[in-house]
């Protein structure tokens, strides 16, 4: 079954995979690294224009490292989780200091970069340098849960069993393994989606354990989406966006107006942003880090 599954997914990917600039053969390791960090928990459609602006302004790690962290946050625009912009700026500095201004090839060196976890290190190793490490994101976990394990959903968080399963289902051929990493992820993003899987368009529907079992509903409590309105994350985002849009420091009184009904929430979010290094205090107000 493994060979049939691999062939079906790889053939489908050749036909239906999205034409993304970081998948082009000429894309630099730095461009691939940026795309992987930017794409975490963020739709590709929002990532691509920001990715293009970043590469135009900072075509190498050295270019980003020479600029200010505040500019990295400003250029992050509305991608969300702006700490990723700071980690990119920090990792660019590490690349300059320790790796001659290049994205490191070694998996352990990738893991040592600021903000890089197991997924990003494996993805960059595979997509930038052809090292066939298992790349396991939410999409991959969902495809394997359904096609191989017959489960409607993957576990709420990555488990040891899921990591082992992903490794076991990697093709033996090096080139196929790297292509599989991209293809199975794409299948989860476009077809084997979480809420409305398009099983009628799936290239492995006839092999899928979940489909063959009649698509049984997952047992246990229903999964709920994350709340957004009124969360600290929303307020933090408003504060950072206010500072991003202003060429000058923003007075404290103006910052307080981003959420006027809850002064304590604004205070808590300001404290968190200061601790994370995303903003800095200036006389009478706040600014992005210089």
Image (spheres, rainbow, N blue to C red):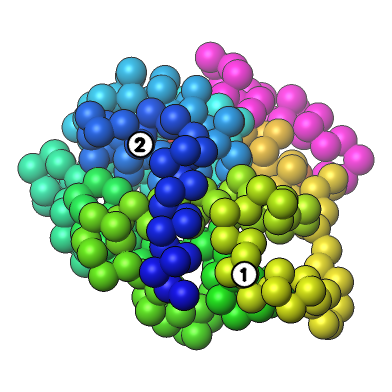
Q: Quadrant of the C terminus?
A: top left
Q: Quadrant of residue 158?
A: bottom right
Residue in the image at 71% along x and 56% along y: 199
Q: Quadrant of residue 115?
A: bottom left
Q: Which mark is residue 170?
A: none
226 over 244 or under it: above or below: below
Q: Which mark is residue 208?
A: 1
Estimate the spatial distance between the alpha carbons at disc 2 and disc 1, rounded to whole Å. Answer: 27 Å
Q: Is residue 251 left or right of residue 133?
A: right
Q: Is residue 87 left or right of residue 266?
A: left
Q: Is residue 70 magenta?
A: no
Residue tagged 2: 23
Segment colored magenta: 241-264
Furthest residue in direction top, as rendered: 247
Between 196 and 15, the one nearer to me in the picture: 15
Q: Which secondary structure lies at badge 1?
A: loop
């Amino acid at each position: 079954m493994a060979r049939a599954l691999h062939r079906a997914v790889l053939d489908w990917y050749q036909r239906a995979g999205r034409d993304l600039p970081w998948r082009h053969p000429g894309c630099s390791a730095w461009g691939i690294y940026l795309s992987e960090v930017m794409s975490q928990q963020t739709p590709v459609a929002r990532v691509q224009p920001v990715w293009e602006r970043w590469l135009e302004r900072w075509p190498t790690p050295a270019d980003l490292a020479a600029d200010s962290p505040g500019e990295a946050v400003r250029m992050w625009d509305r991608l969300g989780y702006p700490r990723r912009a700071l980690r990119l700026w920090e990792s660019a500095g590490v690349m300059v200091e320790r790796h001659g201004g290049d994205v490191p090839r070694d998996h352990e060196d990738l893991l040592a970069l600021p903000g890089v976890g197991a997924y990003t290190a494996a993805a960059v190793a595979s997509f930038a340098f052809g090292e066939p490490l298992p790349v396991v994101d939410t999409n991959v976990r969902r495809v394997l849960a359904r096609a191989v394990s017959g489960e409607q959903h993957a576990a709420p968080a990555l488990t040891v069993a899921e990591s082992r399963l992903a490794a076991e289902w990697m093709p033996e051929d090096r080139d196929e393994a790297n292509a599989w990493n991209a293809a199975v992820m794409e299948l989860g993003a476009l077809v084997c989606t979480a809420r409305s899987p398009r099983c009628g368009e799936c290239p492995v529907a006839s092999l899928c354990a979940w489909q063959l079992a009649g698509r049984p509903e997952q047992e246990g409590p229903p999964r709920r989406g994350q709340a957004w309105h009124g969360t600290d994350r929303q307020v933090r985002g408003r504060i950072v966006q206010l500072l991003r849009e202003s060429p000058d420091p923003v007075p404290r009184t103006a910052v307080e107006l981003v959420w006027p009904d809850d002064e304590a929430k604004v205070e808590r979010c300001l404290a968190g942003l200061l601790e994370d290094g995303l903003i800095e205090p200036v006389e009478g107000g706040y600014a992005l880090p210089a």
